Amino acid sequence: MSDTAAPSQHPLPPLPARQRNADRELNAARLLRASAKHSHDPLTEIDWSAPVDPDHYALPAHRVALYGTPLWERLDERGRARLSTHQFASTTAAGIWFELVLMEGLIRHVYAGDLTTGHAQYALTEVADECRHSTMFARYITATGYPSARPTRRADRLGKLHFLLNDTTMTFAGAIFVEEFTDAMQREMVRDESLQPLARSVARIHVVEEARHIGYAKPELERRWAAMSPARRAVFRRALALLARQAVDEVVHPRVYALSGFDPAEARRAAEANPHWRRARIDWARKALEFFAELGILTPATARAWRRASLLP
Ligand SMILES: [Fe+2]
Ligand SMILES: [Fe+2]
């Protein structure tokens, strides 16, 4: 959109530019068709009045941040199931936080473009998906008795900073990271029939619709990355690693630990040192990081930052 309107110092040959826009429109047309066929209304498709079984885990036990730690040993089976439900509720609260930031970015992207293009129309379609997802997540939070959808103060400030900076390329890169990460987590939930049915229904709807969002963001990031100067790329690589780390930290809000009767600081340290939790984050981040490595956003020089965030082995 805005990148096609701005006169470039080194204009690309007309054919490749036209070709790029043609590819973008073809992709948008495919995504719009898929959205028309496979969109879900979680408010009517999920039975929100069904009671939530307190003995069901929302996440597989080995994917709970405290699994296998001395704190985990202090909980009985029901306490562990409850902790897993609170962790997934906290993940959906982080999802709301991120989706609101993403929606704002997409709206600005449309504002800078032309709504007669399929590309812009798909951006609005994605906003509509995210509106339903955020409402669905809020319903899940309420249904499970988790007390709030508010993010941490740190995430709140980061979101406001993003509103100020309005970096569309960062919006797409962040979306790829967060969407691939939650996609991997939620696919495990969909596969595991022993888990809480409500959590699995939420995960199933989200997995179906997020696949399209990833298909929209990836070629867009590719195009934007190709046009970026080496100096901006260097800053971008570090900023993205930082954003990813903050987003993953937000997955387990300190109140999750407090609700189990733990000291949040002590529990956080136990989770950070927990090899199972490190493994979970690395597994869930893998697909996004493979894509970033392919593009050259993740390089040997920036791998340390990703490793420190327990997102890379
Ligand atoms: Fe979503
Ligand atoms: Fe999404």
Image (cartoon, helix red, strand yellow):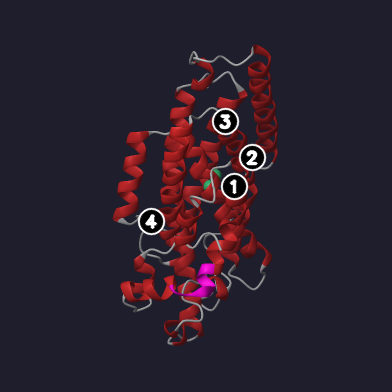
Mark 1 packing: few (<14 Cα in 10 Å), some, or many (20+)?
some
- Of badges 2 and 3, nearer the viewer stands 3
Q: Which residues are magenta?
A: 273-278
| Sooner in the amino-acid sequence: mark 2 or mark 1 | 2
Q: Are marks 4 and 2 in contact (CB under 8 Å)?
A: no
Are the residues at dot 4 and dot 3 in contact (C-beta closer than 8 Å)?
no
Circle 1/circle 3 CB separation < 8 Å: no
Task: Point out residue 152 in the picture as x, y percentages from the top left corner.
Answer: 33, 57
Q: CA distance from mark 4 to mark 2?
A: 28 Å
Question: Which amino acid type is marked by label 1?
Answer: Ala
Gap between marks 2 and 1, in whole Å?
A: 17 Å
Residue drawn at x 62%, y 53% as measured from the top left: 287
Name the one closer to the observer, 206 or 161. 161
Q: Secondary structure at mark 1?
A: helix
Which residue, given by chain and number where applicable, does mark 1 sit on? 293
Q: Is the CB of the residue bearing disc 4 within 8 angstroms of ligand 1?
A: no
Percent x, y of residue 206: 59, 51
Residue with the mark numbered 2: 215
Number of the front mark, 4 or 3? 3
Q: Amino acid at mark 4?
A: Ala
| Residue drawn at the location 41% of the way across and 42% of the way down | 101
The residue beneath circle 3 is 226
Amino acid type of disc 2? Answer: Gly
Amino acid on which disc 3 is placed: Ala
Q: Residue at x 40, y 65 (%)?
A: 146
Residue on which disc 4 sits? 149
User: In the rendered structure, which disc, 2 or 3, sits on the residue that comes first in sequence?
Assistant: 2
**Element assignment for label 3:** helix
Q: Quadrant of residue 36?
A: top right
- Location of the C terminus (image quadrant): bottom right
Q: Closer to the observer: label 4 or label 1? A: 1
